[in-house]
Amino acid sequence: MHTYRSYETFRATDKKYPLLNDVLPFDYPPTHKSQRINYNKIRRIFTPAIIPWFILILGVVLALIQWCYNRSIWLDEGLLALNIIHRTPAELLQPLDNLQSAPILFLWIERLFGTLIPNTEMGLRFFPMLCFVAACVFFCKMLRRESGIPTTSVAMGFFAFNYWLLSYSAEAKQYCVETCVAVVLLYLITKTYKTQLGKCLTLSIVGVMSVFMSNTAVIMLFTCGCYLLYQQLSTGNITLRRLAPLLGVAATWIVSLVVCYVVFVSRNNTTREMMHTSWIAFGGFLSHHPQELFSGNYLMFIVNRLGLFISNVLPTYHIVALAIITLLILAGMLSLLLQKRWGWLILTIMPIVIIVLLSFIQLYPIARRLVFFCTPGLILLFTSGVSYLAGCISSKVKQYSPLLAILPLAMVLTIGFPIQRENFRGAITFVQDQLRPNEQIVGARPSTLRFYSDIGVIKSSTMNQVDTSATLMDNLTGKVWYIVSTPYGGIWDGYRYSPRHVGSNLERRLDSLGYQPIKRYEDFGAAAYLYDFK
């Protein structure tokens, strides 16, 4: 029988007489280090600093789910996809068909993955999904370097759970790639380098690659050039020797832009002119006629166009929600002004200013997908405003501000996830299964129809019964399948997409003529109806 020594006595004996532990009777008390949970180690692992990385992983999981969902290809995707799958890399250097335009390096990479993962939309969407992952990683690393943990968590949530970015990550278009390029440039331009040579080489190589990867790279590179110039001017030591490396970086950027313009852009004049005409008709440019500047309709038009920048941060058209987001962005700008962080003001605001000016002179249209690359900067301003106003209210409010990161995730799940557009594949597959030899198909999108025919989803026998020249309202005879689709899949009601009966106008018109559908298929953004015109 022996007695327990206290833990403190054991530690003292252990240090003073280490050999006595071999001869003295001893039972470890329950409080000994080997028998209790190391809460300090757990706290070191599960710190607030891990929240942004957790958000990043969850965002990547959502992007993978969206990619694996493999939603039906939509109109614009089909038009570009036909160019990618039917052309060789050398032929992609020529102007694209179907009024399409995309950076050459993006087209080559898409062609590569389309070959590696053939006969499916997933191959063409693999590279945008990879760009989403890369953008999230670089955005998280930049946030951890530049801001506090609460701000980092909120910004990461609004970026990784962004509804539009998740949608673009599973789309065979360049919009997610352009956002990734913008984030990478922001990360590299604000990074601290060990040597000036390393900085110049990195910025030169990445800048040249971005020119051939992103249509919006010229705007971001101009912004980055202004940031570098500001950095040099703020040092107060301006000499040719110190400016020479930066001038070398600018020279490589300018040369690559000139080469890109001469080799690719200038040869695509016909497409550019036709797109310019369509954007004028669509209202993508900010009018510059003096007589319209002070009219009420024009001011509402300006608010609507600029509202696209704001609604890219959070998918809403509610006037109150947009006003709150705008207020927080302005508060973020005020916060940066008070902190005299002029460099970040340049990086976040200048791309938007450039786009607005270019739109006034009708050189760049304002549309959601075309200005989405500005969203990372707007998210930075938004979260800076959240942190600033929360700090003004209470330190405890600021401490709980990371909970705001749940909002964009909740909206994505509420609107509907995985995100859909037009389920044309479902409609044409249904029609193909129900099709009889004496029936005709009209109304189908030719580009989407041809894409699914080329990858083997639609049989050649089905294609023989398609009449692409007939319209939905032509006077047809016999049994006819009408296929109706819309790229937006629903009406925006200010908060979420509501699936709608996309063929309602067609049904009402034919119903007024006394015709009722024999068979029908209705899904998100697409519908098919069989009528018998005797």
Image (cartoon, rainbow, N blue to C red):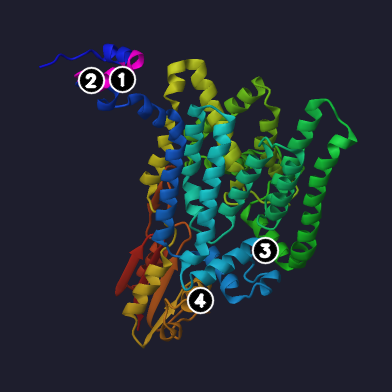
Could you tell me if the residues under marks 2 and 1 are in contact, i.e. CB atoms within 8 Å? Answer: yes
Residue topped by disc 1? 19
Amino acid identity at mark 3: Ile
**Residue at image coords 77%, 56%:** 256
User: Which stretch is magenta?
Assistant: 14-26
In the rendered view, tell whether residue 400 sits above or below residue 394.
Answer: below
Whether residue 46 is situated above or below residue 366 in the rendered picture? above
Q: Main secondary structure of the magenta part?
A: helix
Q: Residues within 10 Å of mark 1 (few under 14, many from 20)?
A: few
- Mark positioned earlier in the residue sequence (4 or 1): 1
In the displayed orientation, state which residue is furthest to the right.
240
Q: Secondary structure at mark 2?
A: loop
Q: Which residue is mark 2?
A: 23
SS at circle 3: helix
Q: Quadrant of residue 76?
A: bottom right
How far, Cα to Cα, is label 2 from label 1? Answer: 8 Å
What's the distance in space between the residues labelled 4 and 1, CA to CA? 85 Å
If the image is split into quadrants, where does the N terminus sit? top left
